[in-house]
Amino acid sequence: MRGAIPLMNPSQRVFVYARVSTPGQTVEPQLRDLRELCKYRGWQPREFVDVGIGGGKESRPGWNDCWDGIRKRQADVLLVHALDRLGRSLPHLVSIMTELTERGIALVSYRENIDLSTSAGRMLAGIFSVLAEYERSIISERTKAGLRAARARGKRIGRVARHFDTERAQELRAQGWGQIRIARELRVGVGRVNAWVRASGAASSGRGSSSR
């Protein structure tokens, strides 16, 4: 038993979350360890599981249910087998840890022997936060460097504007078409048609907003 994690109040409401990423894996080894720890502490946990799916928000129904319960203050402790079962990235993990702390919910990780309700755990959370900020800055700088290099090669950055056929727009306008219908026909935004109408003086009496 991993006795280094301090005992907590047995009456605390505990959520257990376990996850594996591929269908060939099973959460049973994780749950076995976590159930043993819960039994040792006298906890009656509520379990949430995701099996054979990735880390995206939409693909983790078990986690979504778990997080919904946490936000409704239905838990005092979140118990996981390892911290990498939670976050999709270090910044995402830090975001989860921060919100748990703000809500007064203790995060306990079995494998790392971590309890973020303790002073040592809070210090570790602070270190994670610094590392996450460093990771974000590195990604941002690499993105900016990539954009600068692309511009230097003469590559256009951003969405390419769709051609607006003003002659065709004028023909349609003369037939009594409204801006919305013209935009759909020419596959451009309504705002672009509206701007053309204002600039060209093509607006007619009351037909400008028609969607005929």
Image: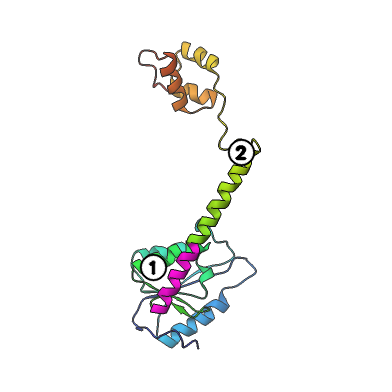
Q: How far apart are marks 2 and 1 (CA)?
A: 42 Å
Mark 1 is on which residue type? Leu
Q: Is mark 2 on a helix, strand or loop?
A: helix
> Whole-percent x and y of residue 9?
34, 83
Q: Residue at x 55, y 56 (%)?
A: 138
Mark 2 is on which residue type? Arg
Q: Does the magenta stretch include residue 43?
A: no
Q: Which residue is drawn at 55% across and 19% down?
A: 165
For residue 111, the mark is none
Q: Which residue is drawn at 47% across and 11% down?
A: 174
**Residue range (magenta):** 118-132
Quarter-of-image position of residue 103 = bottom left
Magenta stretch prevailing secondary structure: helix
> Whole-percent x and y of residue 74?
35, 69
* Residue assigned mark 2: 151
* Residue assigned mark 1: 100
Residue sitting at the far top: 174
Badge 1, how many Cα within 10 Å: few under 14, some, many 20+?
many
> Whole-percent x and y of residue 95?
43, 62
